[in-house]
Image: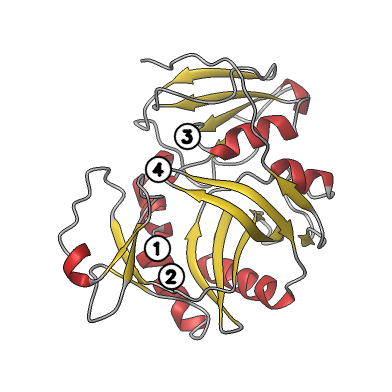
Amino acid sequence: MAAPHGSASDIEILVLGAEKQAATSLASAYPERHFRFVSDHPVVDGWDLANVTIGFATPSRTVTLTEAAERVVVLCPRWLEPAAADRAALPSSLGRLTSVLPDRVLPVETRPLGDGEWIVKGARWHRPDAPLVGDAALLGDLTDPHGCGLAYQRHQPSVAQSILVVGRRGASGNTALGVVEVRGEVLEREAFLVAGETIDAPEIVGDTVRALDTLDHRGFFALSWVVVERRPLLTSFRPVPRAVFGSFRRAGVDLLAEPTVPRVVPAGVCFIGMPSYASFRSLDA
């Protein structure tokens, strides 16, 4: 990909997988930048934003993680090259992290094994359906019509906290991130953040940095943690951001910029999603 020319405000940023909530979070957080939303979904939010244009495309032209920098923001791993998506898939990423964080990773299996309840997840990207929890008999014959792959994880019924670590790791290995206690989230066909607050969690920050170093990941990331019986457990790694751009920028952490030093969003940054009503058009090929 050619190097950009002109000032930062002149450079169009391509947003792939713009049906995700993070797309409008990104564009709203940077009103001085121009974004081109690209999606293969028929309905995409953001038509009311002055700094956004929207177009239809399919993930046939995928990008590498090294390309996903200031000019390209990937919001769904469907748009990554298959090798990159496979490396970041839950069985691969969590499998590698189990050896370095043995008491911190909740592993996944390719099939539900043994007794007890399991939750089924998309292996390479979010499974586009409501969460499904059940025993091996219920989940054992699921199909994968969306091609995301299936991964099964032990269901944790007694979760004290749900925590999301979102950020960006730069080429130098420096990381900018924030630890968000999720106060509200809608998990249906897509996962929508509704409310949250950044917290001071040095143990989770340290384990997250160690995980990213182990995976040698570059670019955006979102790691999901749950706290069970006072113990944090890593349940998911995705090589994409979530809808926190505005809150993080107000706190002084610019996720569009390459991190040159380690940065952590301070505790006490709150956000809440508010209903809004805007005109939209159907996005057709």
Kind of residue indicated by mark 3: Gly
Label of residue 90 in the image? 1
Residue 272 position, x and y percent, is: 70, 45
Using residue 197 as the reference point, say whether residue 2 is left or right of it. left
**Residue bearing mark 4:** 189
Quarter holding the N terminus?
Answer: top right
Kind of residue indicated by mark 2: Leu
Kind of residue indicated by mark 1: Leu
**Residue bearing mark 3:** 17
Q: Secondary structure at mark 1?
A: helix
Q: Residues within 10 Å of mark 3 (few under 14, many from 20)?
A: many
Residue 35 seen by the camera: yes
Q: Secondary structure at mark 2?
A: helix
**Residue bearing mark 2:** 94
Kind of residue indicated by mark 4: Arg
Q: Earlier in the sequence, mark 3 or mark 1?
A: 3
Residue 256 position, x and y percent, is: 70, 41
Callout 2 touching callout 1 (CB < 8 Å): yes
- Gap between marks 4 and 1, in whole Å? 19 Å
